Image (tube, coloured by chain):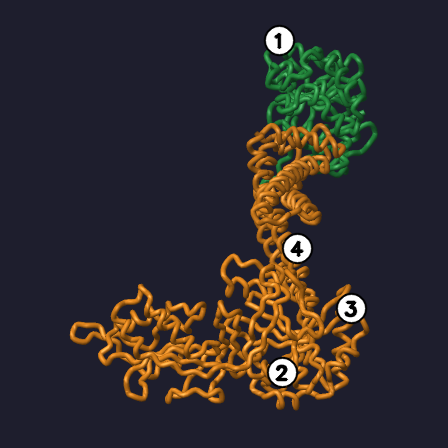
Chain colours: A green, B orange
């Protein structure tokens, strides 16, 4: 359902051209749990941004559920993003002034969903990640692991086609990280497509498929464990 | 994202930094309250002033001027030649529709016209602050007066009215208006001059003269008083260590009533003139002797009275009038002078003419001899007086309303409404145009025109004040823009997150714009509330009932909205344009 074809992303830095992504092609099928592994500077963040519709490639095409998004404008991207993609960040990126409930609710507000339905979904999502009890807590009142769970809940509340997780366990200790990865695996089991970026092979091994990236190029695209 | 959501988000964000929000709002609060308060006060003051003026007078003055010559120097005959004789008072009256207005036509006009119908003769001369009106029965209709007793009626040529100022000035204090109804006063038609002179000892010194002067000035000849209270034109010099008065024969030109002059014996004489006073020689002497005999007079002055000489020309012609009414002063704010009114009659025309040349004295009663004079006189140096040689003072005579043109007033009174007055004026004007007057010889002056002028001036003032106050609002707006820019910058990461999870550009723009609008609107409302309180306070100080007009209210709200939109837009656009990836990378 995600299809990248000959994606190139170039930046101009003075007289140099930086090739962040150099002719990347790859597919993710529905229900897959893919990990993209690479060192820092490998272009994995750029890849993530394009896959997450936060950015458009310099060249190439990107299809999400059959829709070509590479020529979308900002507003179209935002709309698409809102509906199809759920994000999980390394730094959680919860809005500090909103409590857990409100954080999870926010993308639903942007989708224009009515209050009653929103409530249902938020509670469902919070329940799924096991953090219902802390619905009214602010992020500062939650531990790292709890915050990430809220972030996951936020990501799934919109029922996206794919969840993109950028180093989801990067700011967590091993044990909490394990918990988070388990949640992701649970989600995947129930049908959610997940693409995870990491620099850590150990974490990557939780996924069912590992793709490697180095200097803007992909390797082991089709390899499956 | 719905509008309601945006408002909720705005409130949440504003509440989280209450002090900052309040300080930002302060600019708008101050700006709006200034604008609202100032415009309310000026527009309320304007309403009050204009309303008072319009209520005050119901007289419209139609003035006819001659553009060609300076009429003030002309005699009546010459003036008549300037203006068409065919326009009579009747002509004017019949030019107006029946019952539309009452016209009081100025006497000058009618005299020029050779008008013999004196029903509407209106002339005045000023007698030392007393205005003697020869008027007509419509006077009280035109002037909107309150009175004790009643005004004059047709044919009552032996009755008069006085006003409050007259009562206050010339009657003992505490005299009630009601008590004067039925009493009489005398109007004198001849100029009367009494000169009292003292020969002074040869070596008069300054101290002596000054003491004498002080003494004389303080003689109250039962209410009569001397002209002048300064001994002008003398120089005090030191001779042999003593102060002496240097006497100068020429100084009296600037001054009248009391002066020093060399008499025929070449001795210095002190002359006091009482003009137009009813006293006989004997009366005067008696008064002066009494004064000098009183206990308070310095001893060395007692000898002076031996040298008193009185010369006079007795007035013989007077007429007695019965007071039928007293005009109360509060009712006529234009007339603050003392005032006696009579119905005009033929011999009074003569009286009035002669008032130009002399003065009129009024005797209130035998016991209470008041001295009123319309002027003073310069005597010829021989010390004789003859009426013909008297020159008029600057106080008496026909007063010309304008400096360069003689103009004639026709007073119009409205029976029922302003439109009829306007119609009446128009009719007279068009009638007079047929007689050869040019349209630009007319000048219509009324309280309404004055009120309209004032209204216009105050409108301009109101606008100016609003603009100036509005500047403070702009300053407040700049503060808002500044703070919103800071806010947007601080919340860069938040903007990035929101965009990542699906906020469109418009959602971000609205979020911040609404925040700015909430601040300005709430600030505006608080500002209006403050100005409402201020209005009450100022209104009670000024003694006017001040109400904030609806347009001021709307203007203030509108202003704050505009400020919010104008100054909030740029930061909001900046936020909306942020690139999510860069924003997410931000601290």
Read off the chain for label 3: B
Which residue sits at x=58%, y=30%? B18
Image quarter in which the N terminus of chain B is found = top right
* Position above or below: B520 against A111: below
- Residue placed most toward the observer, B151 or B547: B151
Find the distance from the CA under tag 3 to the CA under tag 2: 35 Å
Residue B223 is drawn in which quadrant?
bottom left
- Above or below residue B37? Residue A51 is above
Residue A212: percent from the left, percent from the top? 68, 21
**Position of B339 relative to B44 (above/below):** below
Q: Is residue B473 among what the camera can see?
A: no
Residue at image mark 1: A175
Tell which tag, 1 or 4, sits nearer the viewer.
Answer: 4
Across and down, in percent, residue A136 comes to 67, 17
- Few, some or many C-alpha atoms within 10 Å of disc 4 (few <14, some 14-19, many ≥20)? some
Tags 3 and 2 touching, CB below 8 Å: no
Instruction: Give the spatial CA distance, label 3 vs label 4.
Output: 24 Å
Determine crowd level at label 1: few under 14, some 14-19, many 20+ residues with C-alpha closer than 10 A: few
Disc 3 and disc 1: Cα gap in Å?
100 Å
Contact, CB < 8 Å: mark 3 with mark 4?
A: no
Q: Chain of mark 4?
A: B
Which element is circle 1 on? helix
Asked whether residue B338 appears in the rendered view, the answer is yes
Q: Nearer the viewer, residue B379 or B188?
A: B188
Q: What whole-number distance in Å separates the C-alpha atoms at marks 2 and 1?
A: 127 Å
Which label sits on residue B47? 4
In the picture, the disc for residue B347 is 2
Q: Quadrant of residue B120?
A: bottom right
Chain containing mark 2? B
Task: Tell me the CA gap for discs 2 and 4.
Answer: 47 Å
């Amino acid at each position: 359902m995600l299809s990248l074809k000959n994606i190139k992303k170039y930046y101009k830095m003075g007289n140099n051209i930086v090739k962040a992504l150099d002719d990347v092609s790859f597919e993710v099928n529905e229900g897959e749990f893919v990990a993209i592994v690479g060192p820092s500077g490998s272009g994995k963040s750029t890849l993530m941004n394009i896959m997450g519709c936060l950015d458009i490639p310099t060249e190439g095409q990107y299809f999400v559920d059959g829709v070509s998004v590479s020529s979308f404008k900002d507003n179209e991207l935002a709309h698409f993003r809102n509906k199809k993609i759920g994000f999980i960040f390394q730094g959680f990126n919860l809005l500090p002034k909103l409590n857990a409930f409100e954080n999870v609710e926010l993308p639903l507000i942007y989708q224009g969903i009515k209050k009653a339905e929103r409530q249902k979904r938020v509670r469902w999502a919070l329940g799924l990640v096991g953090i219902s009890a802390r619905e009214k807590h602010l992020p500062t009142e939650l531990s790292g692991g709890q915050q990430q769970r809220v972030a996951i809940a936020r990501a799934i509340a919109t029922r996206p086609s794919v969840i993109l997780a950028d180093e989801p366990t990067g700011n967590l200790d091993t044990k909490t990280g394990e918990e988070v990865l388990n949640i992701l695996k649970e989600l995947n089991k129930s049908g959610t497509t997940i693409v995870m970026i990491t620099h850590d092979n150990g974490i990557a091994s939780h996924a069912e498929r590992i793709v490697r990236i180095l200097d803007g190029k992909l390797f082991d695209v089709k390899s499956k464990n | 994202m719905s509008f309601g959501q945006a408002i909720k988000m705005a409130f949440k964000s504003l509440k989280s930094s209450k002090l900052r929000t309040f300080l930002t709002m302060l600019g708008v609060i101050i700006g709006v309250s200034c604008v609202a308060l100032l415009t309310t006060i000026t527009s309320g003051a304007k309403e009050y002033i204009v309303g008072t003026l319009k209520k005050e007078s119901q007289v419209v003055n139609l003035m006819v001027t001659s553009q060609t010559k300076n009429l003030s120097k002309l005699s009546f005959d010459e003036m008549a030649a300037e203006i068409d004789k065919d326009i009579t008072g009747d002509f004017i009256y019949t030019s107006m529709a029946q019952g539309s207005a009452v016209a009081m036509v100025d006497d000058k006009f009618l005299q020029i016209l050779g008008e013999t119908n004196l029903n509407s003769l209106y002339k005045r001369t000023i007698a030392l602050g007393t205005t003697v009106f020869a008027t007509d029965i419509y006077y009280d209709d035109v002037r909107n007066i309150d009175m004790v007793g009643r005004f004059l009626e047709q044919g009552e040529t032996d009755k008069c009215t006085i006003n409050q100022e007259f009562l206050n000035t010339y009657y003992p204090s505490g005299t009630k208006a009601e008590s004067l109804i039925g009493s009489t006063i005398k109007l004198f038609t001849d100029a009367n001059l009494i000169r009292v002179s003292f020969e002074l000892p040869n070596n008069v010194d300054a101290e002596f003269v000054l003491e004498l002067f002080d003494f004389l000035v303080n003689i109250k000849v039962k209410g009569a008083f001397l002209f002048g209270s300064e001994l002008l034109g003398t120089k005090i010099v030191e001779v042999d260590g003593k102060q002496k008065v240097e006497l100068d024969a020429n100084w009296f030109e600037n001054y009248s009533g009391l002066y020093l002059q060399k008499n025929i014996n070449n001795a210095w004489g002190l002359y006091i003139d009482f003009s137009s006073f009813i006293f006989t020689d004997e009366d005067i002497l008696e008064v002066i002797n009494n004064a000098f005999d009183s206990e308070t007079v310095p001893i060395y002055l007692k000898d002076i009275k031996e040298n008193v000489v009185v010369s006079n020309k007795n007035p013989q012609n007077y007429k007695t009038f019965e007071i039928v009414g007293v005009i109360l002063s509060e009712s006529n704010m234009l007339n603050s002078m003392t005032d006696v009114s009579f119905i005009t009659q033929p011999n009074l025309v003569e009286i009035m003419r002669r008032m130009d040349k002399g003065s009129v004295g009024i005797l209130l009663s035998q016991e209470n001899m008041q001295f009123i004079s319309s002027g003073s006189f310069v005597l010829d140096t021989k010390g004789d007086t003859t009426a013909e040689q008297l020159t008029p003072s600057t106080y008496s005579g026909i007063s010309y309303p304008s400096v360069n043109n003689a103009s004639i007033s026709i007073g119009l009174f409205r029976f029922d409404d302003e439109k009829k007055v306007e119609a009446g004026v128009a009719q007279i004007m068009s009638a007079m145009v047929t007689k050869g007057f040019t349209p630009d010889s007319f000048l219509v002056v009324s309280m309404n025109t004055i009120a309209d002028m004032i209204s216009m001036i105050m409108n301009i003032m109101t606008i100016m004040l609003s603009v100036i106050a509005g500047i403070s609002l702009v300053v407040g707006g700049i503060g808002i823009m500044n703070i919103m820019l800071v806010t947007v910058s601080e919340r860069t990461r938040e903007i990035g997150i929101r965009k990542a999870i699906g906020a469109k550009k418009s959602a971000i723009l609205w979020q911040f714009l609404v925040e700015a609008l909430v601040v300005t609107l709430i600030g505006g409302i608080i500002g209006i509330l403050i100005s409402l309180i201020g209005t009450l306070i100022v209104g009670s100080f000024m003694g006017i009932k001040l109400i904030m007009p609806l347009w001021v209210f709307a203007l203030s709200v509108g202003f704050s909205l505009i400020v919010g939109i104008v100054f909030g837009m740029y930061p909001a656009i900046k936020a909306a344009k942020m690139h999510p990836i860069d924003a997410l990378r931000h601290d």
